[in-house]
Amino acid sequence: VNEFAFTDDPFSKMNKLKARLLANENPLGISPAAKEALCKAAESGNRYAWTEFGQLKKLIADDELVTPETIMLSPGSSDILMASADYFAKNGGTILTSAMTYDDLLDRSAKFGAKIVSVPMTKDYKFDLATIKSKITPDVKLVYLVNPNNPTGTVVPTAELESFIREVAPKVPVFLDEAYIDFYEPAARPKLGKLVAEGQNVILARTFSKIHGFAGLRLGYAIAKPELLKAIKPYTNGEFAVSITTLMAGIASYQDKDWQNHCRAENAKARDYTSKALADMGYEVIPSSANFILFPIRMKTKTFSNAMFANGIGIQTRDFDGQPYCRVSIGTMDEMTAFIDSFKKVVG
Ligand code: PLP
């Protein structure tokens, strides 16, 4: 019996996969310094976290050129996304975004009765900021942007993003989900904390789940002016939802730039290998600036997904405008080789 064969939910076999390339996780694990901090934190498990919140906020604030009062920690950025959806959509209205982006905040807003308006992406699968701007009406309660975007992996030039926020935020708050920002080369990394320091109506959402490998440990944060954080806070689980183990590990990981550089470089190497192998087979891979790639496939998503999972390769699929796509997270080089081998078998 092939234990990866299934007829029900492929994700139920998640922990048994040969290559788990479906959740944009860090395949290299957490930093050695974070591991050490985790073990040390076990000794403090009987104590409430206290000064550690301030320590981490100070580190982030210094890098982002903002004050610690503009940072709110959370157990992963999902809590910030959900709380923002609750707050901004509680009286209905419209949430404006682009088609084909991360759905969590949007789905939650829709549950609260908000209308989601998703404008088409540009031909190169980017957020179409000009069209989004043209759709702003008094009914729009929030603009949701993701940069780098999930699932396309595309980025909008930082200067465009900055001028969009300066123009739009005085009218409508902008939520900029920067879950994948750490995959930018440090010199190219957008530094939009300055917009928060200026008092703009913008929320930057960050996570340790990606380059830091904290998807299971759960750590994220929002950067926004104190009035905005105060508005969202009642809808969050509160900062105490972050454990002392995660906080201490997060403080260590944040300062371990060598590990981040290593993970970024390995990700780029494996991403380039995968993109080239697919291009060599005639597939049009959307250029990605993150730890996953998206490309159109020539099979029904369910058939493709089932066949890949049956080979022990976990991926995700999307159907968009009648076109099926595969989204594959970037794993280790071995995992990506296994992905390409399986892909060749599946597509014939
Ligand atoms: N935002 C985006 C764009 C994501 O892709 C994800 C997770 O993959 C999240 C937010 C939430 O991540 P977490 O709650 O682990 O921080």
Image (tube, rainbow, N blue to C red):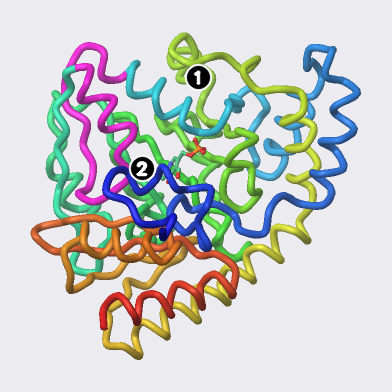
Q: Which of 313 and 323 is in front in this view?
A: 313
Task: Say which residue label 1 marks.
Answer: 229
In which quadrant of the rendered view does residue 267 lie? Answer: bottom right
At numbered mark 1, what does the secondary structure look like: helix, strand or loop?
helix
Please name the amino acid that badge 1 sits on.
Leu
Q: Which residue lies furthest to the front in this view?
A: 1
Element at label 2: helix
Nearest the camera: 292 or 143? 292
Give the magenta range: 88-112
User: Image check: 106 left or right of 61?
Assistant: left
Q: From the image, which quarter does the C terminus lie in?
A: bottom left
> Is residue 316 in view from this perspective?
yes
- Disc 2 or 1, which lies upstream in sequence? 2
Which amino acid is tagged 2? Ile
Residue 10 left/right relative to 347:
right
Q: Which of marks 2 and 1 is in front?
A: 1
CA gap, disc 2 and disc 1? 18 Å
Residue at the location (57% across, 32% down)? Answer: 221
Number of other residues with Cα within 10 Å of mark 1, as a class: few under 14, some 14 to 19, many 20 or more:
some
* Residues packed near mark 2 inside 10 Å, few (<14), some (14 to 19) or many (20 plus): many
- Inspect this view and state whether residue 159 appears: no
- Residue 107 is inside the magenta segment: yes
> In the orientation shown, which residue stands out farthest toward the bottom?
280
Q: Where is residue 148 in the image (x, y as percent from the top left)?
A: 42, 55
Residue 165's label in the rendered image is 2
The correct choice, above or below, for 216 with respect to 257 in the image is above
Q: Quadrant of residue 69?
A: top right
Above or below residue 209? Residue 224 is above
Q: Where, quadrant-wise, is the N terminus in this rendering?
A: bottom left
